[in-house]
Image (spheres, grey):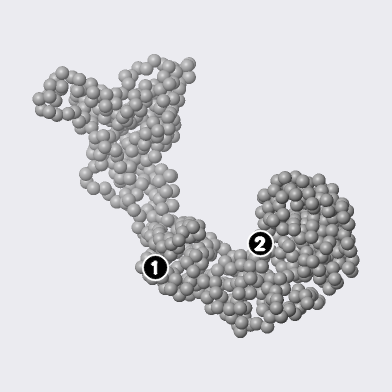
């Protein structure tokens, strides 16, 4: 006796299964007509109109995720074309042809598995059989499931038959990966994309099944099953099949959590609360309790990821109907929690959990990986403040004095740059210690002046300090045409190796923007410019300039046009290493080094040379 359901007035009446054979729910409650197709109204309407107007194509391609009704739609289409009552968009479902098609036994409807019949030999056999007319139906229909598994030669062998098949042949291709199908095949088919089934439609279908089976079920349990199916109606029916065997009397929410290995909403909310409170010990304790109670590690991490996703969506203003896990009555609490945590922090937490899920599939220590991820997301600072500080620094404002911002303190208000003399800290910012920072370009004298004079070069300073400047605490210098030459000489004096030897042949230096210098070379020294443009040397120059100025700087290297070239009127600035070598070669200094067993640490210019420049 047939175990397939029959349809009476649009409702399913499951047939009696034989005593030694049980048919699963997904097969017994398979849709029997376009009216019963769940979650695909656009496909149903298009196919019904095509049949009613007799504009039936010779090849169809059904694409979509698993369990959304592709093969079921292909069978319904076959029934509509070959039903004994005639060509109709509403097959009767009771004639011998419809029943055989539903069981997969009809001789004129051939269902082929593309994964196991993927070679060119199988396609050649198909081509040789297409000329045989149907035995009793109007059409011979080929349904090829997972058609993307066919080989390239098999697709090529099918092209001519697919483009001009006999009048009595129809092709229906089903696939979950249409990107693997050649474009030559796609262009010969009418394509229908099957969307994931929405949660409400799945819940309605599950409710109908449990009522037909004579079983009671909580609405929350069916909703959880529908959400776990992720848009696949067949997956939800398979889960329901397990629950019917697990709790035959009544399907409850607790039974669903126990069977799926998931955590209840209360337990999950407690764990999220500990994470947002940065209480690592409490979070690990709650995680351990959940694992001991039989909750699967991967399921719990996935639930946490979904919860943070809902929190992110609520924080940006999404309504309750867009939540994937949180019920509508908790939406307001979710909005407050999301706004308190901050969008950048939620994004970082979600990214860590997503990486954890990927690694869990390949690791034999899932619990340890999950606990490491929990500790990481508990240690995340307030990234909203970090984004504010980055925007402040990028806009040219002063850098914060503290190295690590407090996660609870509001971000410092940006101060207008250069509002005060460079030696004075911005208003409201923490004052550095009384010892001034070591800066190769000396600060202005302590005298009060309304104008900013050009900073002196390293030749006018006292003892030279070659240690790199800490840009996090150094003051910022304003670069203009009056001091750009001195600052560039200071850069050259701090550069070492071959970088300074190439860069000291410059002709002129100018300011093109607040954070960019242009260093020009004569045409005869173009090879020096090319040598300086090497990525490592150019980066070293920019780094040294940024340390001296106190903010990120860029350097552009250019060659002067011939009409404005001038012979260099300045002596190339010597690097620190060159000055030390020349000093060591001096006979008097060499004798002193030998007598005192000393070495040259730095070279200072005579005071009379500084006075002559003034």
Do the residues bearing badges 1 and 2 touch, measured as CB atoms within 8 Å? Answer: no
Residue at the image point whose x is 48% and y is 71% from the top: 295
Residue 7 pos. (x, y %): 79, 75
Callout 2: SS:
loop
Q: Which mark is residue 66?
A: 2
**Disc 1 from disc 2: Cα separation:** 36 Å
Residue 441 pos. (x, y %): 28, 34
Q: Which mark is residue 284?
A: 1
Residue at the image point whose x is 36% and y is 36% from the top: 543
Foreground residue, 580 or 493?
580
Q: Is residue 510 visible?
A: yes
Q: Assign the N terminus to one quadrant of the image.
A: bottom right
Callout 1: SS:
helix
Residue 91 pos. (x, y %): 84, 68
Residue at the image point whose x is 70% and y is 46% from the top: 152
Q: Assign the C terminus to one quadrant of the image.
A: top left
């Amino acid at each position: 006796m047939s175990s397939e359901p029959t349809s009476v007035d649009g409702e399913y009446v499951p047939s009696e299964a034989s005593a030694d054979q049980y048919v699963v729910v997904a097969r017994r409650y398979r849709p029997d007509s376009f009216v019963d197709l769940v979650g695909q109204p656009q496909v149903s309407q298009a196919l019904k109109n095509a049949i009613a107007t007799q504009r039936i194509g010779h090849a169809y391609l059904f694409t979509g995720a698993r369990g959304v009704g592709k093969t079921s739609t292909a069978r319904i289409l076959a029934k509509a074309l070959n039903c004994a009552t005639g060509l109709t968009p509403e097959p009767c479902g009771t004639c011998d042809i419809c029943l055989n098609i539903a069981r997969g036994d009809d001789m004129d409807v051939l269902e082929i598995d593309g994964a196991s019949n993927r070679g060119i030999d199988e396609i050649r056999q198909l081509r040789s059989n297409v000329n045989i007319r149907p035995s009793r139906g109007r059409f011979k229909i080929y349904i090829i499931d997972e058609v993307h598994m066919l080989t390239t030669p098999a697709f090529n062998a099918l092209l001519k038959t697919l483009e001009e098949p006999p009048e009595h042949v129809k092709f229906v291709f089903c696939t979950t990966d249409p990107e693997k199908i050649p474009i030559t095949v796609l262009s010969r088919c009418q394509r229908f994309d099957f969307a994931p089934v929405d949660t409400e439609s799945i819940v309605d279908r599950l409710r109908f099944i449990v009522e037909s089976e004579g079983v009671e079920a909580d609405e929350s349990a069916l909703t959880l099953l529908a959400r776990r199916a992720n848009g696949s109606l067949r997956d939800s029916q398979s889960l329901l099949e397990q629950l019917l065997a697990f709790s035959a009397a009544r399907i409850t929410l607790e039974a669903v959590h126990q069977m799926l290995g998931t955590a209840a909403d209360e337990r999950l909310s407690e764990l999220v609360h500990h994470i947002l409170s940065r209480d690592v010990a409490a979070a690990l304790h709650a995680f351990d309790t959940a694992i001991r109670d039989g909750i699967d590690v991967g399921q719990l991490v996935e639930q946490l990821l979904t919860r943070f996703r809902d929190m992110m969506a609520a924080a940006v203003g999404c309504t309750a109907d867009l939540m994937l896990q949180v019920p509508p009555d908790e939406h307001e609490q979710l909005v407050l929690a999301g706004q308190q945590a901050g969008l950048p922090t939620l994004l970082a937490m979600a990214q860590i959990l997503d990486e954890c899920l990927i690694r869990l599939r390949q690791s034999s220590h899932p619990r340890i990986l999950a606990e490491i991820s929990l500790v990481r997301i508990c240690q995340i600072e307030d990234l909203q403040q970090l984004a504010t500080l980055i925007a402040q620094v990028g806009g040219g404002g002063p850098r914060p004095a503290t190295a690590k911002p407090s996660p609870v303190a509001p971000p410092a208000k940006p101060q207008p740059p250069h509002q005060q003399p460079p030696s004075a800290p911005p208003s409201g910012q923490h004052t550095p210690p009384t010892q001034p920072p070591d800066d190769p370009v000396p600060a202005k004298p302590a005298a009060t002046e309304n104008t900013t004079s050009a900073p002196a070069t390293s030749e006018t300073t006292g003892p030279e300090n070659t240690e790199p400047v800490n840009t996090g605490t150094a003051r910022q210098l304003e670069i203009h045409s009056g001091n750009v030459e001195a600052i560039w000489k200071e850069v050259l004096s701090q550069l070492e190796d071959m970088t300074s030897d190439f860069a000291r042949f410059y002709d002129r230096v100018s300011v093109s923007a607040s954070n960019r210098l242009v260093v020009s070379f004569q045409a005869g020294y173009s090879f020096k410019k090319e040598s300086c443009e090497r990525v490592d040397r150019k980066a070293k120059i920019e780094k040294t300039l940024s340390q001296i100025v106190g903010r990120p700087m860029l350097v552009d290297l250019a060659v002067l046009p011939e009409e404005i070239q001038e012979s260099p009127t300045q002596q190339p600035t010597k690097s620190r290493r060159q000055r030390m070598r020349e000093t060591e070669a001096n006979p008097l200094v060499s004798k002193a080094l030998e007598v005192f067993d000393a070495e040259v640490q730095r070279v200072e210019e005579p005071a009379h040379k500084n006075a002559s420049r003034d």
